[in-house]
Image (cartoon, rainbow, N blue to C red):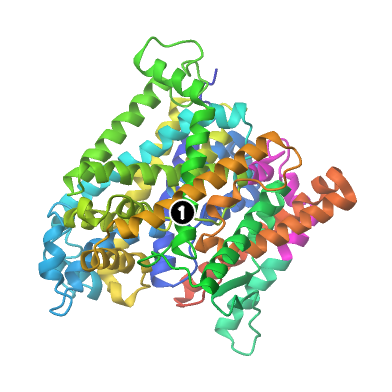
Amino acid sequence: MSNGADVSLRAVGLGALLSVAINIACPYSVLVLHNAGLTSDYLSAGAMMLFLVLVGMVNPLLKVMHRPLALRSGELIVVYIMMIIASAIPTWGLVTNLFHILTRPFYYATPENNWAELVQPLIPSWLAPRDPVVARGFYEGLPQGSGGIPWGAWFVPLVAWGSFMFAVYLWMIATMVILRRPWVDRERLVFPLAQLPLEVLRGTDEHTVPPLFRNLLFWVGFALPFALQMLRGLHHYYFFIPDVQTYHDQLYLFRDSVRVIVFVNFAIIGMSYFLGLQVSFSVWFFHLLGRCQTGVFNLLGYEIKGHNEALTGSSTALSHQGMGAMLALVVMMLWACRAHLRRVARAAWGRPHADDGEKGEEILSYRTAARLWLGCAVFVFGWLVATGLPPLSTAVFLIGAFVIFLAIARVIAQGGVGFTSSTMLPQPFTVYTLGSEAVGWKGLASLSMSYSWAAEMRTTVMASAANAVKLTDGRQLRHARLFWTMALAVLLGMAAATWTTLHLNYAHGGINLRQFGVPAIAWRFLEDKLRNPIGWEHIEPRLVFVAIGAAMMAGLIWLQHHFLWWPLHYIGLPVGDSWVMGWAWFSVFLGWLAKGVVFRFTGSSGYLTAKPLFLGFIAGQLMGGAVWMVVDAVLGEVGNIVYIGVR
């Protein structure tokens, strides 16, 4: 039974401080400096950068000064968990998208687009400030002596959205608490992204400097991407220094109808080395297969009525096919752990049993976790209905969102692909399942505002929580204190990102900062559906491809479980055609190839020996980007984009 000793006050305090720092630094870096995102992918680059510095520099220094000052490995994991939870909130995760979505209809309303009559009345007054002056100050900046951020106008919307998103995030965390045992203890999923901090921490309690940082191969791997990152940043400052490019996006196939991107990223290569060969092979194989399927459709002239939605797959057919695969994955996953879910339900509504998470096996008892899950789900459902989304549409939307979030969390837990997204969004899934008339105009506006938290799918609290519960294995961390630290990280992340985003926009003017694509996509979605209603002629062919995707996933899972020789893992199917995978696939291929060669010629011993080299690839890519973010912030330089992950 855990006594929560590693969830110490100093660990929680440091985790809280760094969580706030991430949610201040990331919006500033992205919005003002136009740098790459620290929190835009499942790798949680900002958290990993700070973790590497903490474990490799700060903690060893504390050991030399006075050893009791240094954090234990369990305490370091608490800090890391808080950071990865908080990393899913700023910019792409929620906050920056949210404020631009809420203000856009009031600032960009013109007589030509008629938003004042068509769009603004569809937005409840408690969700967004309706005063055009508030939106104008957000985009153009406040004049001197105006009194600063108009908190009075923002108070009610902040309370409304803050309570809603806090419930959404607790819903996600509770889901992962409930699924920890079947995923971690029974299926023994690999959780490759959780292995990265564990490798960094290996031996840290016994040695002043962790063994990884004393390994020559680690520094060899670190040097190559770090040097490339330095050259890229220097090229921005000094034009005569060559710009070293590691991507080529001009490969067009199938009569130039399909684009294939070749992009080399050492962080992705390093992570792919830790994937199973079958998993990494499937990831890049299904991406190319999806591109080929789209290419064949283009050559044949096959089209589905309507158009493909932004941030989805390469075609309408592939987008819905991927959604079908995710639906089948989640259904079969829940079916496989049905006995465990019955036990959780019994613990929630019946008499607790000794095996029901009541004795420190989980960070929350199953009774508490199940009731929290249900309470948050009911609150979220009621909140969405109050925004104007009809009950049936709300149910379909939440099922779609839950399926996508859970499927991606499963992909991350089993496949460890740190740079990925879904091929479908819950908003178009809802409309193309029920039709725009059933959703209604107010419902469409509500769906548009939900693009703030359920759109790009490049990072989610659910995936972070999945890695967090894995990191509790074998340590004094399965205690309610850890749950409260995760909840604290959520609250601090939302508060810090909210203040920073509003301050930067009202100080500099949003039109002078980096513009995100999601807010424009959100309101284009509404305009498109108002002007082009969705009927059965749009729905039928899309549902056919949903069924095809579900059948393909079911078949792959069956083959995976019945034939040891079957080479394709089902994890690659639901995410293979996503736009993020379009950038990541070639680096996954290189990681797969490198691991295959190492295994072929040196076996498992060679694989273990080479691990520090690939960890160095990850660290070098991240720290190279971190150096330029610090330099640019000090010098006030804008536009020096040294990418950490995908574009």
Left/right of residue 364 with respect to residue 97 in the rendered view: right
Judge whether 127 appears above or below 469 on screen. Answer: below
Q: Position of residue 166 (x, y in %)?
A: 31, 42
Q: At numbered mark 1, what does the secondary structure look like: helix, strand or loop?
A: helix
Q: Is residue 521 visible?
A: yes
- Confirm whether the magenta stretch covers residue 145: no
Which sits in the foreground, 507 or 566? 566
Which sits in the foreground, 4 or 130? 130
Q: Position of residue 367 (x, y in %)?
A: 39, 20
Residue under the point 51% across and 14% down? 355
Left/right of residue 596 with respect to residue 87 in the rendered view: right
Judge whether 365 appears above or below 290 on screen. Answer: above
Q: Quadrant of the N terminus?
A: top right
Q: Tell me where the magenta segment starts and ends, as one range.
A: 195-223
Residue labelled with disc 1 = 545
Which sits in the foreground, 199 or 111? 111
Q: Position of residue 312 (x, y in %)?
A: 44, 61
Q: Position of residue 257 (x, y in %)?
A: 54, 76
Q: In the picture, residue 244 is in which quadrant?
A: bottom right
